[in-house]
Image (cartoon, rainbow, N blue to C red):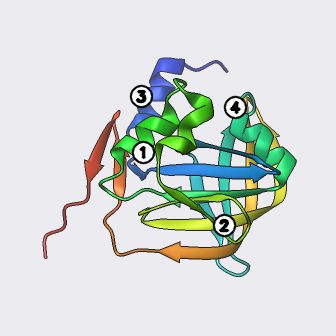
């Protein structure tokens, strides 16, 4: 049964979520992209999943290197999300932000709310994307507030104490 693609996209825009930048390394090649499809899978063992478009440069580097880092962005990092979401200057994205090398060698974006360094344990092709399951090798956290995305725009978390 065919569905209306615009209705499908509208439904997905109604899902509020955190914003992540997935980075990877293979040899001397590093790359990253903004990813909306991220989820925890298991606590024991610690597993997460990300979905990457098969035509993206980052997808190719994850395939080659077998690792990725999920950088969960903090509320003040909208500019970082824009840099990694834009096709403009794609090859110099990491040069436009401050980052350090993690234990796995994949880039950790400075000041992120959290960074999860992962080794790929399985990959499943699904439509235009690959679902990567990553075994978390290292965790880095901060006390920042999260950057949220909802209905095509960035949001902040407001809590009534």
CA separation, marks 2 and 1?
18 Å
Q: Position of residue 35 (x, y in %)?
A: 55, 44
Q: In the rendered structure, which disc, 4 or 1, sits on the residue that comes first in sequence?
A: 4
Q: Quadrant of residue 118?
A: bottom right
Residue carrying label 3 = 10
Residue 56's disc is: 4
**Which is more foreground, mark 1 or mark 3?**
1
Q: In the rendered structure, which disc, 3 or 2, sits on the residue that comes first in sequence?
A: 3
CA separation, marks 3 and 4?
23 Å
**Which is more foreground, mark 3 or mark 4?**
4
CA separation, marks 4 and 1?
18 Å
Q: Residue at x 75, y 58 (%)?
A: 133
Tag 2 near tag 4, CB within 8 Å: no
**Which is more foreground, mark 3 or mark 2?**
2
Mark 4 element type:
loop
Quick one: label 4, few (<14), some, or many (20+) residues within 10 Å? some
Using residue 106 as the reference point, say whether residue 160 is left or right of it: left
Tag 2 near tag 1, CB within 8 Å: no
CA separation, marks 1 and 3?
24 Å
Residue carrying label 2 = 117
Residue 80's disc is: 1
Quick one: label 3, few (<14), some, or many (20+) residues within 10 Å? few
Q: Residue at x 53, y 57 (%)?
A: 99
Quick one: label 1, few (<14), some, or many (20+) residues within 10 Å? many
Q: In the rendered structure, which disc, 2 or 4, sits on the residue that comes first in sequence?
A: 4
**In terms of depth relative to the viewer, which is nearer, 107 or 115?**
107
Using residue 147 as the reference point, say whether residue 32 is left or right of it: right
Q: Position of residue 47 (x, y in %)?
A: 70, 69
């Amino acid at each position: 049964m065919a569905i209306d693609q615009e209705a499908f996209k509208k439904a997905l825009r109604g899902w509020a979520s955190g914003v992540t930048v997935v980075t990877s390394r293979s040899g001397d090649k590093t790359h990253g992209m903004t990813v909306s499809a991220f989820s925890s899978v298991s606590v024991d063992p610690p597993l997460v999943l990300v979905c990457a478009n098969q035509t993206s440069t980052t997808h190719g580097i994850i395939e080659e290197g077998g690792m990725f880092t999920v950088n969960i962005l903090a509320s003040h990092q909208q500019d970082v999300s824009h840099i990694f979401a834009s096709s403009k200057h794609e090859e110099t994205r990491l040069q436009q932000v401050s980052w350090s090398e993690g234990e796995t060698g994949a880039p950790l974006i400075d000041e992120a709310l959290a960074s999860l360094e992962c080794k790929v344990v399985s990959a499943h092709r699904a439509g235009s994307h690959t679902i990567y399951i990553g075994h978390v090798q290292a965790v880095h956290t901060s006390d920042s507030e999260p950057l949220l995305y909802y209905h095509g725009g960035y949001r902040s978390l407001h809590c009534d104490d």
